[in-house]
Amino acid sequence: LNGLLSLTLLAATAAYSEEWLYTVRPGDTLLGVSADYLIRTDYWPRLQALNGVADPTRLPPGMKLRIPIPWLKRMPAKARIVSAQGQVNAVIAATGQTVPADSGLSLQTGDTLLTGSDGAASLEFRDGSRVLLQADSELRMDTLSAYGPTRFADTRIHLQQGRVESQIKSRTGAGPRYEISTPAAASAVRGTRYRIGMDPAAATARTEVLEGTVAFEAHRTTRTVKRGFGTLAEIGQAPLPPVPLLPPPKLGERPPVVTRWPVQLNFFPLKGAVAYRAQIVPADPFKALLLDTLLPALKSDDREAADALTLLLKPVGPDLPDGDYIARIRGIDDKGLEGRDAQYR
């Protein structure tokens, strides 16, 4: 019977590929470890079976106990503002106050981040995942929690309006989750880089996947969106089938070193683009969003359609110190989906 019980418990944990290794301290018991860290004290027999422990009351100090992440207690977590440019405010749920969202400010479950027409912010979550929040956006921290003392986290945020780009730490198996919901659709991932936007005027959510895959769900329908594809969903409607994103625009000649602002970025019109988005970011692109601007496309009958366009890029705020930066530009198609970036470092 004991052997059968052990096999059953081990089979039940096979689905969990993410584990935390706990280092046993003098005096530890499986019951005590379960009480301190696990969601249920009576999980100690599972720990015993999983780790092959002979005596649950006598654990050798220094031993490494394998603990599946979903077994760990859920604890409140925080998000940290890495940088903020322009007008960025936070509404603190605990007090109802609106405060300037300066670098280093911590946000908790229920707090909301707001950017103005010239605002942008970078956020980092417990597990190291980051997001770039663009102008005219409203992002609420629906659930920020961590699994015990580990860096594994559940991050569930709600984009009421605006756009956000995410770089998510890889996750496998059951447990940790990263989700962005909007009034029209929700996206869930376990490690990827993607964008999502909510346009209240058009009542439409859009997503564009740059790495990995995204599950995009609306109106009881889920679309799996792979790398290089995007889709959209209107409020009350199922998402459309994913379509390929526009390729990067072709850049013209550019100097190896820029010595003054604004930066002149030359590029050729991109077939299928009805507009363009240009940005300036640091060499670490999720550290800050220093410029974000839209450029309308040339009309199809414009005589200069075969010539390179010139976009003058000037960052928000004062001149930047010497360093490495990236100017990037992408086309926007007639569905409002933003394509892949052409980059100039």
Image (cartoon, helix red, strand yellow):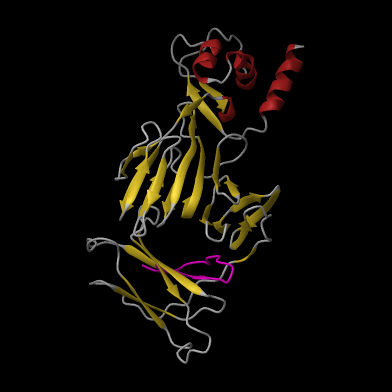
Residue found 34% across the figure and 50% down from its top = 88
Going 59% across and 48% down the picture, which residue do you hit? Answer: 186
Q: Position of residue 121 (x, y in %)?
A: 37, 51
Q: Is residue 342 magenta?
A: yes
Which region of the structure is painted magenta?
Answer: 328-345
As rendered, which of 339 and 258 lies closer to the eye?
Answer: 339
The tally of labels here is: 0
Quarter in which the N terminus is drawn: top right
Residue 168 in view in this figure = no
In the picture shown, does residue 88 fall above or below 263? above
Drawn side of residue 320 relative to residue 240, left or right: left
Q: Nearer the viewer, residue 305 or 214?
A: 305
- Give the image location of residue 14, x and y in percent: 67, 31
Q: Is residue 309 magenta?
A: no
Residue 106 occupies which quadrant of the picture? top left
Specify the quadrant of the image occupied by residue 284: bottom left
Quarter of the figure that contains the C terminus: bottom left
Image height of 310 relative to 31, above or below: below
Residue ranking furthest to the bottom: 303
Q: Residue at x 62, y 37 (%)?
A: 173
- Vertically, is 92 above or below 238? above
Is residue 313 visible from the viewing direction of this image? yes
The residue located at (37%, 59%) in the rendering is: 117
Spot occupied by residue 243 in the image (x, y as percentages of width and height):
64, 65
